[in-house]
Image (tube, rainbow, N blue to C red):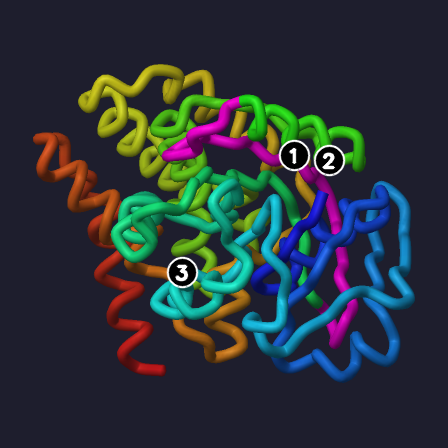
Amino acid sequence: MIVSVIGTGGIGGYYGGRLAQAGHDVHFLLHSDYEHVKQHGLRVDSVNGDFHISAPNVYDDADNMPVSDLVLVCLKTTNNHLLPQLLRSVVGEHTVVILIQNGIGVEEDVQAMLPNAQLVAGLAFICTAKVAPGHINHQCYGQINLGNYSCRDEKALAAIADHFTQAGITAAMVEYREARWKKAVWNMPFNGMTVALNTRTDLLLKNPATRLLIREQMMEIVRAAKHQGINGVDEAFVEKMIAMTDEMTPYSPSMKLDFDFHRPMEIKYIYSRPLEIARQAGMPMPKLEMLEAELRFIESEK
């Protein structure tokens, strides 16, 4: 399988690295660390076993990458306006594009830019980050759920899920809308709260006041999803997410890392779009609306 990874950060480096380690023909698009990875390879330190790809296929120009069977888009959504240019050489008639990105409404907007693309939502449950040029640190978890948005070939998508599993990445086929809103149950409280309070996930849950607030924010998402007829996003799932985070290695989510390194935060798709959808459905989320307003203020002060 020919795979192109658009954005070789913590997510793209880990998943792409695992597929390359399993023998797939993987091509990595890099930016700031292109020369380093070209010379020294890609290093992944992982709880599931460290590995090093000594001579990966690396590019600093997407136009030089091959047409691929699978494209993993691992860019931050703040860069999605670049996708028509970045994908024009790698996407063919039969290419499956997995958007491993945070938020709700991503696929709709990318489809408008690329009407013929076969899009799949990639919901990554993983703690991983790029800690140095060409150096990925995978701390825990690693599962990816695949929600079909517009892929015309279900058999090809099922085969891709099998390839992930054979590479040591647990992969499951899930219902698209349910999967996006389930991911929001974790993303919306923890991403913004770690920025607003300048803290980590474990500390938010150790404090009784913020633990209660996190749970109340999660329940707002549950009610908004149920009001839209989305099944499976329920109180039991909230308790599962809290328990999972209790067991997680102390962690700074992607938005906190973006804030710390003075990068734009993904407010549009993690907050603004789902909040708008919830209001239109008649079930607003006031606590999360307040958090979005705080993040907009913080962003304006950077």
The residue where tag 2 is placed is: 169
Residue 2 place in picture, x, y as percent: 69, 49
The residue where tag 3 is placed is: 77
Quadrant for the C terminus in the image: bottom left
Residue 232 place in picture, x, y as percent: 39, 16
Labels 3 & 2 near each other (Cβ < 8 A)? no
How many angstroms separate mark 3 from mark 2 (CA)? 23 Å
Looking at the rendered image, the disc whose residue lies closer to the viewer, 1 or 2, is: 2
Residue 253 in sight here: yes
The residue nearer to you, when weighing 39 against 91, is 91
- How many residues crowd mark 1 within 10 Å: few (<14), some (14–19), many (20+)? some
- How many residues crowd mark 2 within 10 Å: few (<14), some (14–19), many (20+)? many
Question: Sequence-wise, which precedes: disc 1 or disc 2?
Answer: 1
Q: Which mark is residue 143?
A: 1
Amino acid carrying mark 1 in the image: Gln
What residue span does the magenta drawing correspond to? 131-154
Amino acid carrying mark 3 in the image: Thr
The answer to whether residue 134 is magenta is yes
Quadrant for the N terminus in the image: top right
How many angstroms separate mark 1 from mark 3 (CA)? 21 Å
Left or right side of 207 for 50 = right
The answer to whether residue 242 is magenta is no
The residue nearer to you, when weighing 261 against 51, is 51
